[in-house]
Image (tube, rainbow, N blue to C red):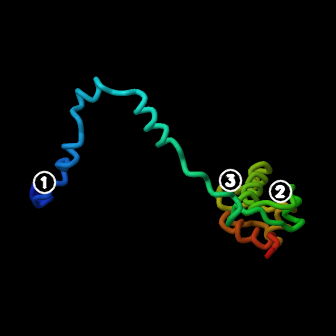
């Protein structure tokens, strides 16, 4: 069995604080007694500012026109790809169309058969691929 010193082979320097960090750090006993509440809240508020979220107009979040078959299921003439998949899953859960023994299989009713090329059973990973035919290509 090797000892920690043989394991790290003289790498103890990694465990100690650097000299510059030790010099810059104030004494913890002094720091607690002289704490200024205005500077600490200002620092916290500057850290709390977050970057603005990217606009949802790109990629799978971009709203695009859909086919009439998909439009009848989602109820909107335009929807994002992620939104469409979400609506399809809501429909599947609402009508209890998942195979109880194998949750990866979805039984298709008449509405889903019109979307999924007339298939009776669809794997859950196929949903996105089969829905891509229902998004109208625009340029």
Tell me what residue is drawn at x 75 percent, y 51 percent: 90
Residue 38 lies left or right of residue 122; in this view the side is left
Q: Residues within 10 Å of mark 2 (few under 14, many from 20)?
A: many
Disc 3/disc 1 C-alpha distance (Å): 53 Å
**Tag shown at residue 74:** 2
Disc 1/disc 2 C-alpha distance (Å): 62 Å
Residue indicated by mark 3:
100
Residue 20 x %, y %: 20, 49
Tell me what residue is drawn at x 68 percent, y 63 percent: 124
Quarter of the figure that contains the C terminus: bottom right
Question: Where, by quadrant of the figure, is residue 8 drawn?
Answer: bottom left
Residue indicated by mark 1:
4
Disc 3/disc 2 C-alpha distance (Å): 25 Å
Residue 13 x %, y %: 15, 54
Q: Is residue 118 above or below residue 31?
A: below
Q: Nearer the viewer, mark 3 or mark 2?
A: 2
Label 3 secondary element: loop
| Marks 3,1: beta carbons within 8 A | no
Residue 5 x %, y %: 10, 55
Residue 31 x %, y %: 27, 29
Q: Residues within 10 Å of mark 1 (few under 14, many from 20)?
A: few
């Amino acid at each position: 069995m090797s000892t920690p010193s043989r394991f790290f082979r003289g790498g103890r320097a990694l465990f100690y604080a650097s000299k510059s960090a030790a010099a810059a750090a104030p004494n913890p006993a002094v720091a607690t007694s002289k704490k200024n509440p205005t500077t600490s809240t200002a620092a916290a508020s500057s850290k709390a500012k977050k970057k603005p979220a990217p606009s949802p107009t790109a990629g799978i979040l971009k709203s695009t026109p859909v086919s009439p078959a998909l439009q009848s299921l989602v109820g909107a003439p335009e929807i994002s790809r992620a939104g469409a998949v979400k609506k399809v899953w809501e429909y599947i859960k609402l009508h209890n169309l998942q195979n109880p023994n194998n949750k990866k299989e979805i039984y298709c009713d008449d509405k889903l058969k019109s979307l999924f090329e007339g298939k009776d059973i669809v794997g859950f990973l196929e949903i996105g691929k089969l829905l891509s035919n229902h998004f109208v290509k625009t340029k």
